[in-house]
Image (spheres, rainbow, N blue to C red):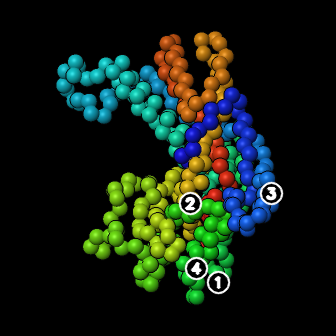
Amino acid sequence: MTGSPDHLPTRYVEWDYLTKGNPKAHFVGEGLTVPPTERGKFKTAQIETPKYQHRKVLGLEDLADRQPGEPTGSMPANMFASAQERAGRLEAEDDIECIEAVAELREIITAEFLFKGLINVFGYGVNRKIDYTLPNKIKLLGSNRWGQVGVDFQDDLREWCGHLEDLGFDPVEIIFSREVWALIEKDERWLKQLDNLRTEKGRFAPEKAAEYGNAQYQGTLRDPFVDLYVQRSSYFDDATGTMKRHIPENSLIIITPESKRNKFAYGSIDYMENGQFKTVSGEFIKEVWHDDRAGTREILVTSRAVPVPGNLNSWLVATVM
Protein backbone atom coordinates (compact mmCIF):
# COMPACT_ATOMS: atom_id res chain seq x y z
CA MET A 1 0.00 0.00 0.00
CA THR A 2 2.69 2.49 -1.05
CA GLY A 3 0.62 4.56 -3.47
CA SER A 4 -0.03 8.20 -2.61
CA PRO A 5 -3.15 8.40 -0.41
CA ASP A 6 -6.27 10.29 -1.44
CA HIS A 7 -8.03 12.62 1.00
CA LEU A 8 -11.63 12.99 -0.07
CA PRO A 9 -14.26 15.70 0.47
CA THR A 10 -17.00 13.10 1.15
CA ARG A 11 -17.21 9.72 2.86
CA TYR A 12 -17.54 8.03 -0.54
CA VAL A 13 -14.68 7.04 -2.84
CA GLU A 14 -15.06 6.22 -6.52
CA TRP A 15 -12.34 4.38 -8.37
CA ASP A 16 -11.92 3.08 -11.89
CA TYR A 17 -10.30 -0.29 -12.37
CA LEU A 18 -9.21 -2.10 -15.51
CA THR A 19 -10.63 -5.52 -16.27
CA LYS A 20 -7.69 -6.64 -18.41
CA GLY A 21 -3.90 -6.75 -18.22
CA ASN A 22 -1.34 -4.15 -19.22
CA PRO A 23 -1.17 -3.40 -22.97
CA LYS A 24 1.86 -4.53 -25.01
CA ALA A 25 3.22 -3.31 -28.33
CA HIS A 26 3.32 -5.62 -31.40
CA PHE A 27 5.93 -6.31 -34.06
CA VAL A 28 4.92 -5.14 -37.52
CA GLY A 29 6.32 -5.64 -40.99
CA GLU A 30 7.67 -2.89 -43.25
CA GLY A 31 5.00 -0.90 -45.03
CA LEU A 32 2.29 -2.02 -42.62
CA THR A 33 0.63 -0.37 -39.65
CA VAL A 34 -0.30 -2.17 -36.49
CA PRO A 35 -4.10 -2.49 -36.01
CA PRO A 36 -5.54 -0.17 -33.39
CA THR A 37 -5.62 -1.62 -29.91
CA GLU A 38 -9.00 -1.92 -28.30
CA ARG A 39 -9.36 0.59 -25.53
CA GLY A 40 -8.99 -1.04 -22.12
CA LYS A 41 -12.37 -1.55 -20.56
CA PHE A 42 -12.88 -0.44 -17.01
CA LYS A 43 -15.53 -0.42 -14.35
CA THR A 44 -16.28 2.21 -11.76
CA ALA A 45 -16.93 1.23 -8.17
CA GLN A 46 -18.20 3.37 -5.34
CA ILE A 47 -17.32 2.55 -1.74
CA GLU A 48 -18.65 4.14 1.39
CA THR A 49 -15.51 4.42 3.45
CA PRO A 50 -15.91 2.52 6.75
CA LYS A 51 -15.61 4.59 9.91
CA TYR A 52 -13.67 3.15 12.83
CA GLN A 53 -12.83 4.65 16.17
CA HIS A 54 -11.07 4.06 19.47
CA ARG A 55 -12.12 5.97 22.59
CA LYS A 56 -10.63 6.39 26.08
CA VAL A 57 -12.01 8.27 29.08
CA LEU A 58 -9.80 9.49 31.93
CA GLY A 59 -11.58 10.23 35.23
CA LEU A 60 -10.69 11.25 38.76
CA GLU A 61 -10.79 7.64 39.92
CA ASP A 62 -7.88 6.88 37.55
CA LEU A 63 -5.72 9.43 39.39
CA ALA A 64 -6.43 8.33 42.96
CA ASP A 65 -3.75 5.67 43.19
CA ARG A 66 -0.07 5.80 42.41
CA GLN A 67 1.08 4.93 38.91
CA PRO A 68 3.65 2.24 38.02
CA GLY A 69 7.15 3.42 38.92
CA GLU A 70 6.05 5.88 41.61
CA PRO A 71 7.37 5.52 45.17
CA THR A 72 5.43 3.36 47.56
CA GLY A 73 5.05 2.85 51.28
CA SER A 74 5.73 5.60 53.82
CA MET A 75 7.86 7.88 51.64
CA PRO A 76 7.23 11.66 51.87
CA ALA A 77 4.17 12.94 50.05
CA ASN A 78 6.24 15.25 47.84
CA MET A 79 7.84 12.21 46.21
CA PHE A 80 4.52 11.06 44.81
CA ALA A 81 3.22 12.45 41.52
CA SER A 82 0.46 15.02 41.66
CA ALA A 83 -2.93 14.35 40.09
CA GLN A 84 -2.02 16.57 37.14
CA GLU A 85 1.30 14.79 36.64
CA ARG A 86 -0.46 11.43 36.68
CA ALA A 87 -3.08 12.76 34.27
CA GLY A 88 -0.40 13.98 31.88
CA ARG A 89 1.18 10.55 31.74
CA LEU A 90 -2.14 8.76 31.27
CA GLU A 91 -3.25 11.25 28.59
CA ALA A 92 -0.11 10.59 26.56
CA GLU A 93 -0.63 6.83 26.88
CA ASP A 94 -4.28 7.16 25.83
CA ASP A 95 -3.34 9.22 22.77
CA ILE A 96 -0.85 6.58 21.63
CA GLU A 97 -3.23 3.71 22.32
CA CYS A 98 -6.06 5.27 20.31
CA ILE A 99 -3.88 5.93 17.26
CA GLU A 100 -2.27 2.47 17.38
CA ALA A 101 -5.68 0.78 17.75
CA VAL A 102 -7.03 2.57 14.67
CA ALA A 103 -3.85 1.75 12.72
CA GLU A 104 -4.13 -1.93 13.69
CA LEU A 105 -7.69 -2.16 12.38
CA ARG A 106 -6.50 -0.54 9.15
CA GLU A 107 -3.89 -3.31 8.85
CA ILE A 108 -6.57 -5.96 9.36
CA ILE A 109 -8.87 -4.61 6.66
CA THR A 110 -5.87 -4.31 4.33
CA ALA A 111 -5.16 -8.01 4.81
CA GLU A 112 -8.82 -8.83 4.12
CA PHE A 113 -8.69 -6.68 0.99
CA LEU A 114 -5.53 -8.35 -0.35
CA PHE A 115 -6.36 -11.97 0.45
CA LYS A 116 -10.14 -12.13 0.28
CA GLY A 117 -11.14 -9.12 -1.76
CA LEU A 118 -13.87 -8.74 0.83
CA ILE A 119 -13.91 -6.47 3.89
CA ASN A 120 -16.43 -7.23 6.63
CA VAL A 121 -17.57 -3.95 8.18
CA PHE A 122 -19.13 -5.29 11.37
CA GLY A 123 -19.36 -3.42 14.66
CA TYR A 124 -21.45 -0.95 16.63
CA GLY A 125 -24.50 -0.13 14.50
CA VAL A 126 -22.98 -1.33 11.23
CA ASN A 127 -22.99 -4.65 9.34
CA ARG A 128 -22.07 -4.61 5.67
CA LYS A 129 -19.45 -5.87 3.23
CA ILE A 130 -17.13 -4.18 0.76
CA ASP A 131 -16.64 -6.60 -2.16
CA TYR A 132 -13.80 -5.96 -4.62
CA THR A 133 -14.46 -9.18 -6.62
CA LEU A 134 -10.81 -10.25 -6.53
CA PRO A 135 -10.04 -12.01 -9.87
CA ASN A 136 -6.79 -13.89 -9.17
CA LYS A 137 -7.90 -16.06 -6.26
CA ILE A 138 -7.08 -19.77 -6.25
CA LYS A 139 -7.97 -22.58 -3.86
CA LEU A 140 -6.40 -25.99 -4.33
CA LEU A 141 -8.64 -28.94 -3.45
CA GLY A 142 -8.25 -32.65 -2.83
CA SER A 143 -5.20 -34.27 -4.40
CA ASN A 144 -4.01 -30.93 -5.84
CA ARG A 145 -3.18 -29.48 -2.42
CA TRP A 146 0.43 -29.00 -1.46
CA GLY A 147 1.85 -31.85 0.57
CA GLN A 148 -0.09 -34.48 -1.42
CA VAL A 149 1.80 -37.17 -3.31
CA GLY A 150 2.88 -36.04 -6.77
CA VAL A 151 2.22 -32.32 -6.22
CA ASP A 152 5.19 -30.07 -7.08
CA PHE A 153 5.15 -26.68 -5.37
CA GLN A 154 7.34 -25.14 -8.04
CA ASP A 155 5.08 -26.16 -10.92
CA ASP A 156 2.19 -24.30 -9.32
CA LEU A 157 4.33 -21.22 -8.61
CA ARG A 158 5.61 -21.17 -12.21
CA GLU A 159 2.06 -21.40 -13.52
CA TRP A 160 0.74 -18.64 -11.26
CA CYS A 161 3.66 -16.32 -11.93
CA GLY A 162 3.21 -17.02 -15.64
CA HIS A 163 -0.43 -16.04 -15.38
CA LEU A 164 0.53 -12.65 -13.92
CA GLU A 165 3.22 -12.23 -16.59
CA ASP A 166 0.64 -12.92 -19.31
CA LEU A 167 -1.36 -10.02 -17.87
CA GLY A 168 1.70 -7.79 -18.09
CA PHE A 169 2.84 -7.92 -14.45
CA ASP A 170 6.26 -9.09 -13.26
CA PRO A 171 6.16 -11.09 -9.98
CA VAL A 172 8.89 -10.03 -7.57
CA GLU A 173 7.90 -11.47 -4.17
CA ILE A 174 5.97 -14.35 -2.67
CA ILE A 175 4.84 -14.21 0.97
CA PHE A 176 3.86 -17.49 2.65
CA SER A 177 1.93 -18.19 5.81
CA ARG A 178 4.08 -19.97 8.38
CA GLU A 179 2.59 -23.47 7.97
CA VAL A 180 3.03 -23.34 4.18
CA TRP A 181 6.67 -22.36 4.62
CA ALA A 182 7.13 -25.15 7.19
CA LEU A 183 5.93 -27.61 4.55
CA ILE A 184 8.33 -26.19 1.96
CA GLU A 185 11.28 -26.44 4.35
CA LYS A 186 10.78 -30.19 4.58
CA ASP A 187 11.43 -30.62 0.85
CA GLU A 188 15.21 -30.68 0.37
CA ARG A 189 14.91 -30.89 -3.42
CA TRP A 190 12.84 -27.72 -3.47
CA LEU A 191 15.21 -25.89 -1.11
CA LYS A 192 18.09 -26.54 -3.54
CA GLN A 193 16.38 -24.13 -5.92
CA LEU A 194 16.99 -21.28 -3.49
CA ASP A 195 19.77 -18.79 -4.10
CA ASN A 196 22.34 -19.47 -1.35
CA LEU A 197 24.34 -16.28 -1.75
CA ARG A 198 22.56 -14.62 1.16
CA THR A 199 22.85 -17.44 3.70
CA GLU A 200 25.45 -17.93 6.41
CA LYS A 201 26.45 -21.13 8.20
CA GLY A 202 23.31 -22.99 7.26
CA ARG A 203 20.92 -20.26 8.31
CA PHE A 204 19.29 -17.52 6.29
CA ALA A 205 20.70 -14.05 6.94
CA PRO A 206 18.30 -11.23 6.01
CA GLU A 207 19.67 -7.81 5.12
CA LYS A 208 18.27 -6.46 8.37
CA ALA A 209 16.83 -8.00 11.50
CA ALA A 210 13.13 -8.67 11.09
CA GLU A 211 10.87 -7.16 13.69
CA TYR A 212 7.99 -9.24 14.97
CA GLY A 213 5.08 -8.92 12.57
CA ASN A 214 7.18 -8.02 9.54
CA ALA A 215 7.52 -10.44 6.64
CA GLN A 216 10.89 -12.19 7.06
CA TYR A 217 13.14 -12.84 4.07
CA GLN A 218 13.91 -16.53 3.54
CA GLY A 219 15.73 -16.69 0.21
CA THR A 220 15.42 -16.13 -3.53
CA LEU A 221 13.96 -18.74 -5.84
CA ARG A 222 15.73 -19.24 -9.16
CA ASP A 223 12.74 -20.38 -11.22
CA PRO A 224 10.59 -18.33 -11.08
CA PHE A 225 13.04 -15.65 -9.96
CA VAL A 226 11.31 -14.16 -6.91
CA ASP A 227 12.17 -13.31 -3.31
CA LEU A 228 10.49 -15.49 -0.69
CA TYR A 229 9.15 -14.29 2.66
CA VAL A 230 7.21 -15.77 5.56
CA GLN A 231 4.69 -13.77 7.58
CA ARG A 232 3.97 -14.80 11.19
CA SER A 233 1.99 -11.88 12.62
CA SER A 234 -1.44 -12.30 14.21
CA TYR A 235 -4.08 -10.25 16.01
CA PHE A 236 -6.88 -10.78 18.53
CA ASP A 237 -10.34 -10.90 16.99
CA ASP A 238 -12.89 -9.43 19.41
CA ALA A 239 -15.83 -10.99 17.56
CA THR A 240 -14.63 -14.58 17.99
CA GLY A 241 -12.34 -14.18 21.00
CA THR A 242 -9.53 -15.94 19.13
CA MET A 243 -6.19 -15.08 17.56
CA LYS A 244 -6.21 -14.71 13.78
CA ARG A 245 -3.47 -14.30 11.18
CA HIS A 246 -2.91 -11.25 9.01
CA ILE A 247 -2.06 -13.78 6.29
CA PRO A 248 -4.73 -16.51 6.39
CA GLU A 249 -3.63 -20.02 7.26
CA ASN A 250 -2.41 -22.28 4.44
CA SER A 251 -2.09 -19.43 1.96
CA LEU A 252 0.36 -17.31 -0.02
CA ILE A 253 0.38 -14.11 -2.04
CA ILE A 254 2.36 -13.31 -5.21
CA ILE A 255 3.25 -9.63 -5.41
CA THR A 256 4.20 -7.39 -8.34
CA PRO A 257 5.46 -3.79 -8.38
CA GLU A 258 2.03 -2.68 -9.64
CA SER A 259 0.27 -4.25 -6.66
CA LYS A 260 2.53 -2.31 -4.31
CA ARG A 261 1.03 0.87 -5.72
CA ASN A 262 -2.31 0.11 -4.10
CA LYS A 263 -3.22 3.00 -1.83
CA PHE A 264 -5.55 4.24 0.90
CA ALA A 265 -8.38 6.67 0.39
CA TYR A 266 -9.54 8.63 3.42
CA GLY A 267 -13.19 9.64 3.52
CA SER A 268 -14.31 12.83 5.22
CA ILE A 269 -15.46 13.01 8.84
CA ASP A 270 -18.06 15.43 10.16
CA TYR A 271 -17.70 16.77 13.69
CA MET A 272 -18.33 19.83 15.85
CA GLU A 273 -15.69 22.12 17.35
CA ASN A 274 -16.46 25.23 19.44
CA GLY A 275 -20.09 25.07 18.38
CA GLN A 276 -19.24 24.93 14.66
CA PHE A 277 -19.73 21.95 12.34
CA LYS A 278 -16.61 20.95 10.42
CA THR A 279 -15.71 18.43 7.73
CA VAL A 280 -12.13 17.15 7.49
CA SER A 281 -10.26 14.26 5.91
CA GLY A 282 -7.07 12.78 7.26
CA GLU A 283 -5.28 9.65 8.42
CA PHE A 284 -6.22 10.07 12.09
CA ILE A 285 -8.78 12.63 13.29
CA LYS A 286 -8.43 13.26 17.02
CA GLU A 287 -11.08 14.91 19.18
CA VAL A 288 -10.59 15.73 22.86
CA TRP A 289 -13.20 16.90 25.39
CA HIS A 290 -12.85 18.04 29.01
CA ASP A 291 -15.71 18.14 31.51
CA ASP A 292 -14.60 20.09 34.57
CA ARG A 293 -17.73 19.30 36.59
CA ALA A 294 -17.49 15.55 35.99
CA GLY A 295 -13.68 15.57 36.21
CA THR A 296 -13.17 13.65 32.97
CA ARG A 297 -11.04 13.91 29.87
CA GLU A 298 -12.13 11.99 26.79
CA ILE A 299 -10.22 11.28 23.59
CA LEU A 300 -11.69 9.86 20.38
CA VAL A 301 -9.61 8.95 17.30
CA THR A 302 -11.50 8.33 14.05
CA SER A 303 -10.43 7.21 10.59
CA ARG A 304 -12.22 6.42 7.35
CA ALA A 305 -9.41 4.66 5.51
CA VAL A 306 -10.26 2.14 2.81
CA PRO A 307 -7.85 0.31 0.44
CA VAL A 308 -8.07 1.28 -3.22
CA PRO A 309 -6.40 -0.97 -5.82
CA GLY A 310 -4.55 0.31 -8.83
CA ASN A 311 -5.27 -2.86 -10.80
CA LEU A 312 -7.07 -5.85 -9.31
CA ASN A 313 -5.21 -8.19 -11.67
CA SER A 314 -1.76 -7.24 -10.35
CA TRP A 315 -1.48 -9.81 -7.53
CA LEU A 316 -2.53 -13.40 -6.91
CA VAL A 317 -3.52 -15.22 -3.73
CA ALA A 318 -3.75 -18.96 -3.31
CA THR A 319 -4.91 -21.36 -0.59
CA VAL A 320 -2.60 -24.33 -1.08
CA MET A 321 -3.11 -26.66 1.92
- Residue on which disc 3 sits: 36
The reply to whether callout 2 and callout 3 are in contact (CB within 8 Å) is no
Query: Quick one: label 4, few (<14), some, or many (20+) residues within 10 Å?
Result: few
Q: Read off the residue under disc 1.
A: 143
Looking at the rendered structure, the secondary structure element under dot 1 is: helix
Mark 3 vs mark 1: which is more N-terminal?
3
Q: Position of residue 111 (x, y in %)?
A: 58, 53
CA gap, disc 2 and disc 4: 18 Å
| Type of amino acid under label 4 | Asp
Drawn side of residue 79 relative to residue 48, left or right: left
Local secondary structure at mark 2: strand
- What residue appears at the point 41 percent right and 80 percent down from the top-left corner? 192
Give the mark nearer the N terminus: 4 vs 3.
3
**Residue at 31% in and 28% down:** 66
Q: Earlier in the sequence, mark 2 or mark 3?
A: 3
Question: Mark 2 and mark 1: span between their CA atoms?
Answer: 26 Å
Task: Report the residue marked by disc 2.
Answer: 255
Q: Which dot, 2 or 1, sits closer to the camera?
A: 2
Q: Position of residue 124 (x, y in %)?
A: 67, 38
The residue type indicated by label 2 comes to Ile
Marks 3 and 1, how far apart in space? 45 Å
Please report whichever mark, 1 or 4, sits nearer to the chain's N-terminal start.
Answer: 1
**Distance in Å between CA atoms under marks 4 and 3:** 36 Å
Q: Nearer the viewer, mark 3 or mark 1?
A: 3
Badge 3 marks a residue whose secondary structure is: loop
